Amino acid sequence: MEPTSYDLVVIGSGPAGQKGAIAAAKMGKRVAVIDRYDMLGGVCLHAGTIPSKTLRLAVLYLTGFQQKSFYGQAYSPKSHVTVDDLMFRVRTVVEREQAQVTDQLQRNDVTLVNGWASFVDAHTLQVEDGQQVRADHILIACGTRSARDPEIPYDGQKVMVAEDFGSAGHGEIPRSMIVVGAGVIGLEYASMLSALGVRVTLIERRDTMLDFVDREIIEALRYHMRRRDAIFRLGEHVTGVRIQDNGLVRAELESGKRVTGDALLYTVGRQSNADQLGLDRIGIDTDARGRVTVNGNFQTVRPHIYAVGDCIGFPALASTSMEQGRLASTHMFDGPSLKPAPFFPYGIYSIPEISMVGRTEQELTAERVPYEVGKALYEDVSKAQMVGDRAGMLKLIFDPDTLKLLSVHAIGEESTEIIHIGHAVIALGGTIEYFRDNVFNYPTFAEAYKVAAYDGFNKIAEVR
């Protein structure tokens, strides 16, 4: 049986694969996407971004987290929150999003091929059911899975990775949880669990957390999590994990400490699924995490084979992966010459959430770039008072001579939304005068930009 031929075959239907496939289809190319039907939408939809961010909203709603500042710590819309309560919302959103992904691909005449692919040769892919497809170009967008330490006894219930969280236990939320790894995923889950009243111990091998984030913002997050009784064990390495006879999980630390909890969540890195594609058969190497190396146009060492999304590494965001997929397809089919934007917004959906665009204070200092900072505390913003968020802060970092906006860093409610205002001003080469001289809807979180700009003007007036 002859392989079915396409202009482009995409391996994976997550954000990168979707946008790459649709971009090629809109250029009149014959496109197929290979993925299991039950995984349409990719890891992003089924185990990553969409479930975890929906889970966060469910936690905020069911616990009345923001409303407690008005009605007291005893206030809760639901007296006893279970895992099933949280996952009901997640399942609903995932079902709707999967239907939308399917509709978008079908409306653009993208063929869906059910199964997992592996390379036969540089232009041919074998699908699990015995079918073969052939393509002039191939786009690898296969995503990642949670990395696992072979020495840790995962059972998906007491000792788990992020993908296990929704199915763990019998509907009951653990009273205490050990979270190993203080990266983005670890911090997001640890902060959600602490908002649920779970006693969280967060263990991180490094002495610092998220070095690419502004230090003041990270310190603010740690402060608010500590107020919810979260414990941080930084500079500690887990050497062993066991489930005790009494049902508790015990983590042994290199320092000699022992930490126990009802469950343990392991969130130390991600493993690329590209290591399962048989890339060695066509001369494409992967690193220890299975990541594929690409050039500035997302080409591998085989120029007709491209790779995008989480499987190529940092920044491994759904938002940047979408753009990488589009840029890759545009390049392979000689579309308009496009390059990734120099800055992109970063969102961390902890409680409170964090967002940033541009360089941090520590990066600017290392590069010897002079700057000044204007801040707005949410307690000075009317909208924040209305929703009960006093944890928030917005920082504008700008050139003190030209007033050009260099970066924006935010923590608090809607920070991942309002960051785009600063992003647009940076992209257009604007100054903080924009925030002073333009009208913002009142009351809004966006008003924080005006407050922060005035603070910045006051600071440079003091030194002149």
Image (tube, grey):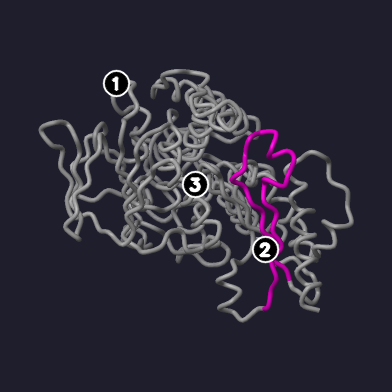
SS at mark 2 in the image = strand
Q: In which quarter of the image is the C terminus?
A: bottom right
Residue beneath disc 3: 224
Quarter-of-image position of residue 96: top right
Q: Quadrant of the N terminus?
A: top left
Of 328 and 250, nearer the camera is 250
- Could you tell me which residue is drawn at 70 percent across and 61 percent down? 396
Q: Residue furthest left?
A: 245
Q: In the rendered structure, which segment of residues is drawn in magenta?
A: 370-398
- The answer to whether one can see residue 293 in this image is yes
Residue 407 marker: 2
- The answer to whether one can see residue 143 in this image is no
Q: Where is residue 22 in the image (x, y as percent from the top left)?
A: 63, 42
- Could you tell me which residue is drawn at 31 percent across and 49 percent down? 180
- Alpha carbon of mark 3 to alpha carbon of mark 2: how far? 24 Å
Which marked residue is nearer to the observer: mark 3 or mark 2? 3
Amino acid bearing label 2: Ser
Image position of 22 (left or right of 202):
right
Amino acid bearing label 3: His
Q: Earlier in the sequence, mark 3 or mark 2?
A: 3
Residue beneath disc 1: 170
Image position of 219 (left or right of 208):
right
